[in-house]
Amino acid sequence: MKIAFFTDAYLDLNGGIVSSMNAQKHALEELGHTVYIFSTGFHRPERELAALMNDYIYIVPSCKLFFLGIAPISRRPRVIEKWLMKNFPELKEFDVFHIHYEGGCSIAGIRLGRKLKIPVVQTMHGREDMGETSIIPFGLRSFVAFHLNWFHSWYMPHETKVKKDKYLATNYARAKMWTLMVNHANAADAVITPSKHFKEKLTHYGVTRDIDVVSNGIDDDLVPARVSARRIMANEPLKIVWNSRFSPEKRAMKFLEALKMVDFPYVMEAFGSGTDIILGKNYVKLNRLKVNFHGDTKREEILKTMKESHLGVLASYGFDNQPMTMLEAEVTGLPILICDPDMLEVTTKNGVYLADGPEPKDLAKALTDIYNDPEKIVRMSVAMIKDRNQAKQSHQIKKLLSIYERVKK
C-alpha cells in the first residue's frame, strides 16, 4: 500500500506523537509498504531537506515568523492543498491518508482525501482541551480556544457543539477545544485512539464514527534484546528517570516539589525540554535537589538510562492518553510511578505504582513507600519484563493494517 501521514506535530518536535509515527512508518516499510510524511517544519539547509526527502518526509508550507510556542505551524490549509497537488500529483494514487493531529496540515490532509476520494484515518492522540489550558496563560485561554475553533470551522463543518459541563468541558475554553476535537474526528472515515478511556471520552462528547483502540508501539529496533529485573541495594540512591516534556501539562514542577519532601538518597535523570525547563533548573539549584538535566536526547540514550535505573515517573494528571514513556518503561523492564488512575490501562498493572493522589505530598509518600520496600521494585520490574513484547510496534502493526484494509473497501 501507499500511505500518506499528515501531521502538525513531527518535525522540530520531540514527544510521543513523533515516536509513535516513526515506529509506525518503520514497521510499515519493513512489511513492504510506502509511507510519506507531510509535516510542518522550520527552515532547513538544502542538504537536510534532501536527506528528509530521501526518506519520503516533506515540509509543507509553514509560517516563517509566527509560531505557537516551540511548534512550527502551517500556512492555511488551502495553501497546503494547492502545494501538495502541484508537487505530489501521485497522491491521487495513494491507498490511505492517515492524519495524526488537528492543525492546518492535518486539516489539509482530510480535505484532500475527500477531494481525491481516498479513505481517511484519524488518530486522536491527545487531550487538546487540557493542552490548551495548560500552556496558554490564564487570561488568554478563552480567546485562543475561540480563534482555534473558528479557524477549524472555516475548513470543516462543526455539526456538533460541546457545551460547558461538570465533566471535562468545565470551562468555555475546554468546551471549545472538545468541539474542535469531536468535529475533526467525525470528518474521517475511521478513528483511532491509543486507549479505551480516551475512546469513551470522545464518544461521550459526540464522536459518531466507530473508534478503534490501537496501542502505540516502540520501534522494535529500539527495544533492548535483554533486560534484567531491577534491584536496589542497601543505602543505594534510588535512580529515577523523568522522560517527558518539562511543562505544565506534564506537572514537572509538582514532581520537583515532591522530591524536595523526601528524606532518602536519590538521583533523577531528566530528559526532555519544555516551557518549565528554566523554572525547573532554578528550583533544583535553589533547593539543592539531585537532578541532572539532559534536554532533548536520542531515544537510544534515554532507553539505555531507563534500562539502568530503578524507577520511571509520570506526574501528569487528566492529560495523557497513552504516554510513550510508559511503553518505553515496559520494554526496558522499568517500574513506573503514576498518579492518574487512567494510566493503569497503559501497561501491566503489576509494573505500575499508583500514588494516592496527584499532589506533591502524594507523590513524595509513594516514592518513600517504594524506597522502603526494595522487593516492590523487583516485583514490578519482573512484571514489566514479562509483558514487554506487547509494547513493540510489530505487535500492533497488524491492527493498523486491518483498519487500512477496512476503509479501502
Image: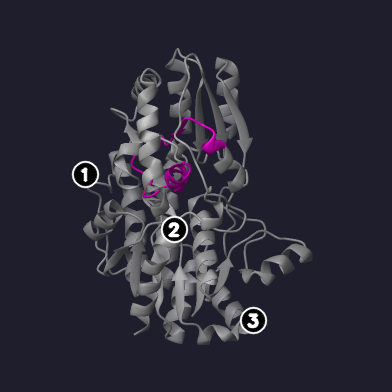
Q: Residues within 10 Å of mark 3 (few under 14, many from 20)?
A: few
Q: Nearer the viewer, mark 1 or mark 2?
A: 1
Mark closer to the chain start, 1 or 2? 2
Residue placed under numbered mark 3 in the picture = 87
- Tell me which amino acid carries mark 3: Asn
Is residue 187 at least partly visible in the picture?
no
Q: Is residue 177 on the magenta stretch?
A: no
Q: What is the span of residues highlighted in magenta in the rendered image?
A: 305-332
Identity of the amino acid at label 1?
Lys
Q: Nearer the viewer, residue 102 or 393?
A: 393
Question: Mark 2: which secondary structure?
Answer: helix
Q: Disc 2 designates what residue?
A: 148
Q: Residues within 10 Å of mark 1 (few under 14, many from 20)?
A: few
Say if 318 sits above or below 398 in the image.
above
The location of residue 136, given as percent across then percent down, is 47, 44
Residue 325 in the image: x percent, y percent?
Answer: 46, 44
